[in-house]
Every structure is written in C-alpha cells, then in structure tokens.
Image (tube, grey):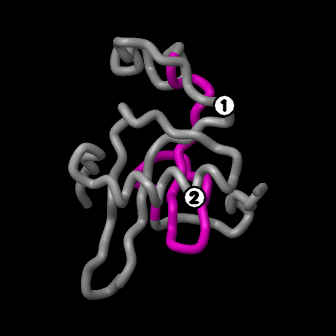
Amino acid sequence: MGYLDFDDEKENLIIIRSALHRRNLFMDEDDQWEVHGPHPDMDYQVFTGRAYEQPPAVYTICTCKTTGFDSCKKHHNGIYVAIYPKAVYVIQAPEDWLKVNQEDRITIKK
C-alpha cells in the first residue's frame, strides 16, 4: 500500500477521475488516496479514497481530523470507494478494499 502524490502521478489521477466520472462521482484532489498493488499475487492496482455525488465544497482547512468524517463540512457527503480495473465499489473504510461485495458495486451512469 502507498499513498498517491497527484503532482507526480498524473496517470493515476486520470484513471481515478475517469472511473468516477462514468459513475457521476467526483473526487477532491486534496484528499489522500491509497494505491494497492501490483504485487506477485495481484497484477493490477486498486485505488481507494473518498468520492462525492456533487463536486466537494472547497475549504482551505479540512476539519475532519478534529470533528470526525461525518461532521466535517467538506467531507460529510462523501463515501469511500475502491476502484478496481473494471469496477468501482462502495467500502466502509480504505482498509476494506479487499472486502468488496457485488451488491456494493457502483454502476456506470454515462
């Protein structure tokens, strides 16, 4: 597992944006996203982070570290997602990226 730096990893940013866009979702590029793989048992990458149904409001300071994810004015409408090569799933937390269920799959809208 590693964290993405979108300044240096533009190709990953494009992959994430595209997967979310096809599902009418958005990302906040200031959020921290994780990448899992590839490794010997998994020849692909999975990206995890927050997604939003509407573009997130832009605030200069994120308060979710002090108030909690559900109370943060910037992040309260977000959901965690796991982006696989051919599917996107809702997950409860970034560490749940391996625990995806078919009923949590987000369908393509566009």
Quarter that holds the N terminus: bottom left
Vertical position of residue 50 compared to residue 98: above or below:
above
Assess whether mark 1 and mark 2 are in contact (beta carbons under 8 angstroms).
no
Q: Position of residue 81 (x, y in %)?
A: 54, 51
Report the front residue among 1 and 68: 1
Return the residue at label 2: 19
Q: Position of residue 53 (x, y in %)?
A: 68, 36
The type of residue carrying mark 1 is Gln
Left or right of residue 17, residue 3 in this image:
left
Total of numbered circles in the picture? 2
Query: What residue occupies the far bottom of the structure in this picture?
Result: 40
- Report the span colored magenta: 74-97
Vertical position of residue 1 compared to residue 34: above or below:
below
Report the front residue among 15 and 99: 15
Return the residue at label 1: 54
Point 76% across, 57% down: residue: 110
